[in-house]
Amino acid sequence: MTAATRMTGTTAASAPDDAEHGHALTGTGTLVRVALRRDRIVLPVWLVVVSGLLVASIVSVTGLYGTEAERVAYATVASASAVARAFDGPMSGTSLGAVTMTEVFGVLAVLIGIMCSQAVVRHTRLEEESGRAELVGSAVVGRHARLTAAVIVLTGISLVTAAATTVTLLAHDLPVAGSMLAGLALAGVGVTFGSLTLVGAQVTASARTANGIGAAAVGIAFLLRAVGDAAGEVAASGVKVVSAWPSWLSPIGWGQQARAFEDERWWVLGLFVAASAAATAVAFVLSVHRDVGAGMHPPRSGPAVASRATATALGLAWRLQRGGLVMWSVGVAVIAAALGGIGEQAGELVATSDELAAALAALGSADALIDLYFGFVFGIVGLLAAAAMVQGLLRLRSEEAAGRLEPLLATACSRGRWLTSHAVCAIGGGGLVLVVAGLIAGFTDAAVAGSFDRFGSLVAAALVQFPAALVLAGVAIAATGLLPRWAAAVGWGAVGVAFVVGQLGALFGLPQAALNVSPFTHVPLVPAEPVVWLPLLLSLLVAAALAAVGTLALHHRDIRS
Amino acid sequence: MPPVIVVEQLTKTFGDVVALDHLDLSVDEGEVHGFLGPNGAGKSTTIRVLLGLLRRDAGHVRVLGGDPWRDAVRLHSRLAYVPGDVHLWPTLTGGEAIDLLGKLRGGLDRRRREGLIERFQLDPTKRCATYSKGNRQKVALVAAFASTVELYLLDEPTSGLDPLMDTVFQACVREAIAGGATVLLSSHILAEVEALGDRVTIIRDGRSVESGTLAELRQLTRTNVRAETHRPPGDLTAIAGVHAVSVGADGRVELEVEPDALTEVMRHLTEAGIRSLVSTPPSLQQLFLRHYDLSVPTAPDVVGTTSTSVSAADDATSP
């Protein structure tokens, strides 16, 4: 037999084989295994964080509202407060489980939404962008294998999260039905955001943009349900909220409307199934109408010559960071408008917290209460600004890892100049976020209050966050210099620690020593407290020291992709 | 005149992996120096040390009279670098990337830039994300050759180019040399180095194994002889320094001859009555294979290979 006929023979023999086994899905199993292997560290970390948050929340609710009477009091106040409804979600009853769900479901849903959307991007668009998908696609892998594998991984990690949630709730002696519904609702949130991101990953050719689409979907869903819950009505019992229609546009809202632990609405799970199935179907349709590596829109051509501004290190850094900074600024502006708009109602929110109520008793006046509220919420704004800085600074490492730093440093551009260019954009951008937040919160508060009395102090409340945000920026720079491979983990880890300590520390009853770890603990509660310069200066010093260490380390290490 | 690049006993390790092991390299002003070695031999690592991107563990390195680690920025305005695997910013156009790299190096010649874009047939308005490997390489090549520099560090610069563009590249290198520049050309494409190179350094496992002019290196190796004779030339394999003898059915004989055995071989052939004779200098390919012990074919090997390929060809053409 000749070589040629041997070849033809093999092909002829294998062709019907393929048809029998559905060749569009060939290789799916292998891709799923590869994906799970790649995620073997990141997914367990997410699971531990989510479960840990849930445990902490159960423990804190059990401790603070141990008796039915305490829970009725809490639920009554939390139902009546539009602010509390907007932040936490609708009260569904007074059982331990129901109160815990109101406290923690929104946060868990956001985390799982981000976890799932990032996982989807990692296994679809990022693979294409890196060129690996092309290599894999040339092997014996079916046309739909990659997308199918992503859907399987997405469903799998969501169900594992559901199981972990259910087991955690059961372990704390909560009812079986509610525990299962809570777990499945979280899984539903994850699958829905994952599927929406799957569509996004077909439309855009950039993994970064696809991640942005996923995060935006989560953010919009949170806002929609915040609006719907705030506009909702308190039921006759006084401990239950009937949300307005915008909550039903949000997957996070669906999860809360399922009302685990209080007359469970199992049919809500159908919404997740329907939405995910629809989004997944759209993704599959889109995927067959495009080439591997391409988005839905052919990329536009651009200038043949660089403008004077682009052809500099600073111009390049700005070009690379501006998209992210615009997104941060718009997002924080929306949040600041909401925060400023409800300042006048702050009394209700503060009354739901024992610690704040105690602080309030010492202060005495209604204005002082509102000042205290602003002092607290600007801590959140400060953290967001820090996150914007960290994201911008982590560009340093991602540029290096992608091999784009090498040709740049092979020119007369020094390491210091490159670092400074990105730092100017990231830190300047974070500062801009703070200024925008202060101004917008000031204007909306003035519009609601009918006077500009608080305007100056709100802008000040935003600006005092700057040194603390710089400390986290310093951590990101230090990690880039010292631990390049771990820079992203360290940078985002620092933001996570500051978030847990600052926003949840009191809830968890952390000791002062642990609270002191976060730079935001040391920010004066402007406008409730006067601007104190010493902690601000100390924060600046710490930030400068961290940045100096990182810069020095960067100058003394190899550049490695 | 001191060499443009001096590398003595350069050592670089990554954890347990010894990437460069007492490597030596010397590049003179105005030459195209071929830097040869298989994948993973340490060519790119050496060039990254020369660029000050990697810090040497031990050894002495000078580039254009300076220390590449300490004087990186000052030196980089006098040299241009083209990596083998060019990574660019996906949202920038090719033209913007060229200008960015050129301006950061200290400016580029606008007229030469346009000329090079035309010669390399590059569309500078396309986003870098949409470029193929070859086109990304063209961006780096245009950015490099549009700058007026003294030294070009080219790390497998043509691995993504088609043969036509390869010709353009070679012309660019010759123009650069004519303008007084020096070129270090790392490659595993031997024809490229043969076409351009004055001297070569061959490295293996992070060590230099051979260095010299192509002529010198050929001295160390064998000449290929192909001859047709009237009568069978006798047993050539008996001559010391003769390798890879194959005798065809039509009286044609092919063999590789070490320099010392040439006279003796010619005597044998002459006695058998030469009908035709072709003698070719050893290709760099053979030179290369010899240094890597990648089985410089011995006589039985050649016969074996030939018979296999013949039967395979028969196979393919038979119905």
Image (cartoon, coloured by chain):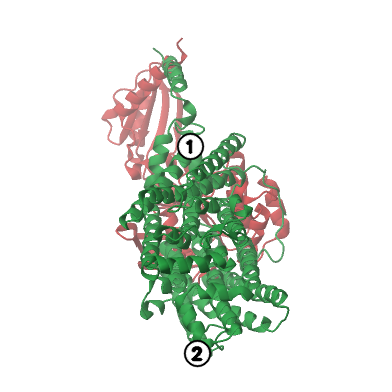
Chain colours: A green, B red
Q: Secondary structure at mark 1?
A: helix
Q: How would you rate the neighbour count of disc 2 (Cα within 10 Å): few for under 14, some for 14-19, many for 20 or more?
A: few
Which of B106 and A260 lies nearest the eye of the viewer?
A: A260
In front: A406, or A221?
A: A221
Can residue A67 be seen here? The reply is yes
| Residue A204, position as x, y percentages in the image | 61, 47
State the image coordinates of residue A381 (x, y, percent, origin top left): 57, 72
Identify the residue at image location x=61%, y=83%. Answer: A367
Q: Which mark is residue A148?
A: 1
Instruction: Tell which circle, 2 or 1, labels the residue nearer the N-terminal end.
Output: 1
Circle 1 crowding by C-alpha within 10 Å: few under 14, some 14–19, many from 20: many
Q: Is residue A422 above or below residue A285?
A: below
For this rendering, which residue is in front, B283 or A552?
A552
B84 to the left or right of B130 = left
> How many angstroms separate mark 2 from mark 1 (CA)?
57 Å
The answer to whether the residues at label 2 and label 1 have Cβ atoms under 8 Å apart is no
Quadrant (top left/top right/bottom left/bottom right) for the N terminus of chain A: top left
Residue B159 appears in the picture as rendered: no
Query: What residue is rendered at 51% in x and 83% in y?
Result: A360
Q: Which label number is shown at residue A534?
A: 2
Locate the C terminus of chain A and report the quarter of the image it occupies: bottom left
Chain ID of residue with mark 2: A
Residue A497: give x, y in percent of width and height.
Answer: 42, 69
Marker count (numbered)? 2
Return the x and y of residue B261 as percentages of the image width and height.
33, 37
Q: Amino acid at mark 2?
A: Leu
The extreme top residue here reads B319
Q: Compared with residue A141, is residue A374 higher up or lower down, i.e. above or below?
A: below
Q: Amino acid at mark 1?
A: Thr
Chain letter of disc 1?
Answer: A
Q: Give residue B126's mark.
A: none
Q: Secondary structure at mark 2?
A: helix
